[in-house]
Amino acid sequence: QVQLVESGGGLVQAGGSLRLSCAASGRTFSRYLMGWFRQAPGKEREFVAGISRSGGTITYTDSVKGRFTMSRDNAKNTVSLQMNGLKPEDTAVYYCAASDLGWTTTPGAYDYWGQGTQVTVSS
């Protein structure tokens, strides 16, 4: 089992940057596929980025490619999401999540979730 705690959200102007972090408890962090998801008001939770257990494979949803960078540090039990060139449409609650299944971008396949951190981008 793993517990996840996000931090780093906030209010930023369009074009600005934020760095989200997710700290995981437990000694088996490296066994989990990690993902970042977001949910805007009135919308379904959507996949943003995912990283493999070793960190060697990273995938992004098309709308954030070239702007967001996901990374993980298995020695420190952390994952991060560097967000540059933020747009108002990036406004949402951002969640990190962990899955011990195979590669997936489906929220339902992730077993563990953080509490979420709000990101608000003003125009």
Image (spheres, rainbow, N blue to C red):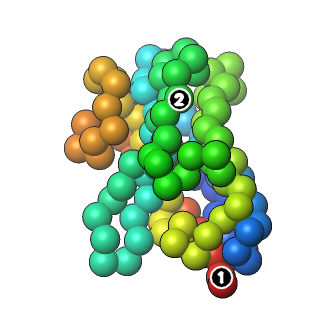
Instruction: Give the total of numbered labels.
Output: 2
Q: Nearer the viewer, residue 70 or 32?
A: 70
In the image, is 107 to the left or to the right of 22? Answer: left
- Residue at 31 percent across and 31 percent down: it is 104
Q: Position of residue 23 (x, y in %)?
A: 60, 40
Residue at mark 2: 58
Q: Earlier in the sequence, mark 1 or mark 2?
A: 2
Q: Is residue 18 visible?
A: no
Q: Is residue 19 left or right of residue 119?
A: right
Mark number for residue 122?
1
> With respect to residue 14, does 47 lie above or below?
above
Percent coordinates x, y for residue 105 in the rendering = 33, 38
Q: Residue at x 33, y 59 (%)?
A: 45
Would you place residue 50 above or below residue 121 in this image?
above
Q: Secondary structure at mark 2?
A: strand
Question: For the residue marked with disc 1, what is the amino acid?
Answer: Ser
With respect to residue 114, does 2 lie above or below?
Answer: above
Please indicate whether residue 113 sits to the left or right of residue 88 in the image.
left
Crowd class of label 1 (few under 14; some 14 to 19; many from 20; radius 10 Å): some
List x then y, in percent, for residue 120: 60, 75
Q: Quadrant of residue 87?
A: bottom right
Q: Is residue 75 left or right of residue 58?
A: right
> Which residue extends farthest bottom?
123
Q: Residue 69 has which mark?
A: none
Q: Quadrant of the C terminus?
A: bottom right
The quadrant of the picture occupied by the N terminus is: top left
Distance, label 1 to label 2, CA atoms, is: 28 Å
